[in-house]
């Protein structure tokens, strides 16, 4: 399959999962109308959830999930050594995701509460980039497959993917979605990185910031806007800490 | 008999999450047959503490990427029970439609992508893209239809956004719903082709007497809420789920284990079909009959067929539900007002892999004081373990090889369609 008489690369792709729900990797098997084409332009060599082939010779490693156990650190270091390109895939990999809420609690008490005397290995949740260097971050809880397809195209052609600098708010306007603030809900859409096409506000739920902070977010102004709609600073911070993408503002663990 | 066999599977493939299999047979005698869950624990019950009532469903959806709609439904149901909220009838119908969408999507994912490759002698479904694009196209159409139905009704398939405490955020576009009904009817030949495909496969000849636990339907095949029943005769209201599960911690696994009247019990499509066979749609019964599936069936590999039977059931039920919903005025209220009060509530939902329970205790401000979630695969783990021992014993015969036994043990675990990361939440 040539394009402008050039044979495209068919990168060897591996997908690995850590502390998470496996919802992001599932998106790779979704968007069925283009699934067959998607599979043809890449070579999946290691993807435990869908294939029994385990090949450690890969170009691009997609890392799904946060890191919260010693054996996960070991596995991740090994993958970093082998991968030419390492992609943090989804909000858990990028920021720690909802798993990071755990860090607000006392870990040994948590372990005692869930497992009693037969406690299990665990450690504070960390994002992938807190352990190894990351070449690209694709946020989202879950990731947006349409965006992933466009990113993979760029990886194939060795082009830079232009991640949007505009916030989610912009995408709501394009969809003519009624503002959730106007409906009495808290919404981080005006300070959260766009690129998801704003499915949450369209479905009746405010944006809770799963893609992390937008490049040009005016946080001080946002606190003022939220206050005018009746939401305190602590209401906003609670939501900012839900997916862990605003730690530079909130200082959460 | 000189028969030595050894199976060591580290991180079993084509299942959700991380589990290991160890089987050791020496001189024809099974010395070890173990199923071990090594998934990283996430501590959702602790994360829930202190969260507001309208965050619980959004947070617990993230327990599972495959059955996030089911988790959200169990969560909002538990909260609604704690606050004494009545959900409008239209919202109940919309929730059931979203539930059917998830069941269809998850079952097709399992049947085509996770289970079928074993029967076709392939490592995954990927080689079929070149060698048998027709099958892949059928799988894509059926699963795609189910996913897009979830997108429309629940706002998104993975981690839904429109299922709120009190009801549903909005009425979906009714014309779009009717278009889905038409698409589902157009796809019926694909469903038939799937049935034909599964008729050509041979399931391992194996059975072990098992206790099956599920919701108990009264007038409808049950998916959301109601009483609990076991095939051994236990019968409890939803609120007494703890006496149906008896969860306990084991040393060798990060998932907890459960038991009821025996050492282990099973939940899932086969349990539901076994306990509620008489409530299946007539078209689904026809399919069950084709495969010789009638209650009580004790072959765990038949869970694949039970899923197929449920796909037929959910397809016909969805068509009927869409027609009922489309006949309602578009302005009908889909959400009741919610006023948080201190209280405890339980929500039980049949998710694709079996019965799921959420329980929350709230303070007067509507913040979670205590939470408990019991996952289908948590309930199945002990049963998988017990099956593994029996399977190893039965197949420790002349001619058996390490690789054949490894495949059989792997297929056994896959038949349960385990959601391992879910079970270690």
Image (cartoon, helix red, strand yellow):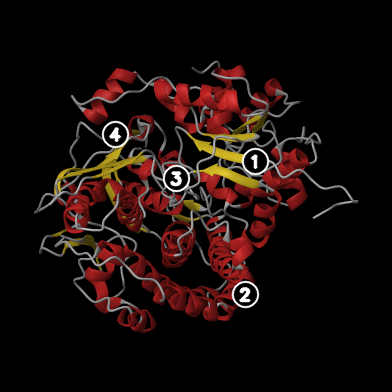
Identify the residue at image location x=34%, y=64%. B223
Q: Residue at x 26, y 62 (%)?
A: B300
Residue at 59% in and 49% down: A28
Q: How many marks?
A: 4
On the picture, is A42 further left or further right than B49? right
- What separation in Å lies between label 4 and label 2 (alpha carbons)? 45 Å
State which tag comes first along the sequence, 3 or 2: 3
Which residue is identified by label 1?
A12
Q: What residue would you read off at disc 2?
A: B179
Q: Earlier in the sequence, mark 3 or mark 4?
A: 3
Residue B34 coordinates in the image, percent (x, y): 23, 42
Element carrying mark 2? helix
Is label 3 in a helix, a strand or a loop?
A: helix
Question: What is the CA distance from the residue labelled 2 to the residue labelled 1?
Answer: 39 Å
Which of these two is toward me, B287 or A158?
A158
Question: Which residue, given by chain and number where applicable, does mark 3 sit on?
Answer: B61
Q: Give the letter of the chain under mark 3.
A: B
Residue A33 image-quadrant placement? bottom right
Nearest to N terminus: mark 4 or mark 2: 2
CB atoms of marks 2 and 1 within 8 Å: no
Q: Position of residue B270 (x, y in %)?
A: 28, 65
Q: Nearer the viewer, mark 4 or mark 2?
A: 4
């Amino acid at each position: 399959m040539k394009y402008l008489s050039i044979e495209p690369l068919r990168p060897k792709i591996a997908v690995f999962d850590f502390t998470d729900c496996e919802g992001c990797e599932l998106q790779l098997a979704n968007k069925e109308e283009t699934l067959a084409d998607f599979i043809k332009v890449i070579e999946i060599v290691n993807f435990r959830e869908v294939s029994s082939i385990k090949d450690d010779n890969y170009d691009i490693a997609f890392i799904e999930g946060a890191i919260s156990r010693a054996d996960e650190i070991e596995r991740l270091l090994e993958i970093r050594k082998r991968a030419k390109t390492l992609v943090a895939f989804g909000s858990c990999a990028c920021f720690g995701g909802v798993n990071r809420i755990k860090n607000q609690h006392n870990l040994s008490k948590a372990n005692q509460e869930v497992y009693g005397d037969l406690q299990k290995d665990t450690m504070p949740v960390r994002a992938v980039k807190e352990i190894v260097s990351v070449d690209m971050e694709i946020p989202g809880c879950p990731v947006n497959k349409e965006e992933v397809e466009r990113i993979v195209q760029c990886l194939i052609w060795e082009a830079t993917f232009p991640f949007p600098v505009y916030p989610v708010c912009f995408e709501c306007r394009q969809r003519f979605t009624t503002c959730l603030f106007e409906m009495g809900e808290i919404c981080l859409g005006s300070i959260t990185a766009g690129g998801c096409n704003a499915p949450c506000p369209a479905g009746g739920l405010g944006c809770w910031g799963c893609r992390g902070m937008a490049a040009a977010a005016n946080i001080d102004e946002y606190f003022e806007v939220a206050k005018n709609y009746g939401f305190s600073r602590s209401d906003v911070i609670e939501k900012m800490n839900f997916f862990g993408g605003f730690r530079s503002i909130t200082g959460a663990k | 008999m000189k028969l030595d066999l050894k199976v060591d599977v580290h991180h079993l493939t084509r299942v959700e999450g991380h589990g290991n299999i160890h089987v050791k047979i020496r001189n024809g005698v099974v010395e070890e047959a173990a199923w071990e869950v090594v998934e990283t624990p996430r501590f959702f019950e602790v994360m829930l503490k202190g969260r507001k009532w309208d965050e619980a469903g959004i947070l617990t959806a993230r327990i599972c990427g495959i059955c996030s709609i089911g988790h959200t439904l169990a969560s909002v149901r538990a909260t609604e029970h704690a606050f004494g909220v009545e959900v409008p009838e239209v919202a109940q119908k919309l929730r059931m439609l979203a539930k059917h969408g998830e069941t269809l999507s998850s079952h097709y994912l399992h049947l085509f992508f996770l289970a079928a490759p074993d029967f076709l002698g392939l490592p995954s479904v990927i080689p079929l893209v070149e060698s048998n694009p027709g099958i892949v196209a059928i799988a894509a159409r059926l699963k795609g239809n189910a996913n897009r139905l979830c997108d429309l009704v629940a706002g998104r398939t993975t981690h839904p956004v429109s299922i709120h405490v009190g009801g549903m955020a909005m009425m979906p576009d009714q014309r779009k719903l009717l278009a889905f009904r038409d698409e589902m009817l157009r796809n019926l030949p694909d469903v038939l082709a799937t049935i034909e495909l599964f008729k050509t496969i041979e399931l391992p000849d194996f059975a072990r007497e098992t206790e099956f636990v599920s919701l108990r339907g009264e007038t409808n095949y049950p998916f959301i809420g109601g009483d609990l029943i076991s095939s051994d005769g236990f019968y409890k209201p939803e609120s007494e789920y703890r006496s149906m599960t008896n969860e306990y911690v084991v040393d060798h696994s990060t998932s907890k284990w459960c038991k009821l009247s025996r050492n282990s019990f099973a939940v899932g499509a086969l349990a539901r079909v076994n306990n509620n066979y008489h409530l299946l749609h007539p078209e689904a019964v026809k399919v069950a009959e084709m495969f010789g599936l009638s209650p009580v069936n004790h072959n765990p590999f038949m869970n694949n067929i039970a899923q197929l039977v449920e796909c037929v059931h959910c397809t016909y039920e969805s068509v009927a539900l869409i027609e009922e919903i489309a006949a309602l005025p578009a302005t009908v209220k889909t959400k009741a007002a919610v006023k948080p009060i201190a209280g405890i509530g339980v929500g039980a939902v049949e998710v694709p892999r079996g019965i799921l329970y959420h329980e929350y205790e709230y303070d007067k401000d509507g913040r979670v004081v205590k939470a408990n979630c019991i996952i289908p695969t948590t309930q199945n783990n002990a049963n998988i373990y017990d099956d593994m021992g029996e399977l190893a014993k039965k197949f420790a015969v002349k001619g058996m090889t390490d690789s054949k036994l490894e495949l059989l043990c792997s297929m056994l675990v896959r038949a349960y369609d385990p959601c391992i990361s879910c079970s270690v939440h």
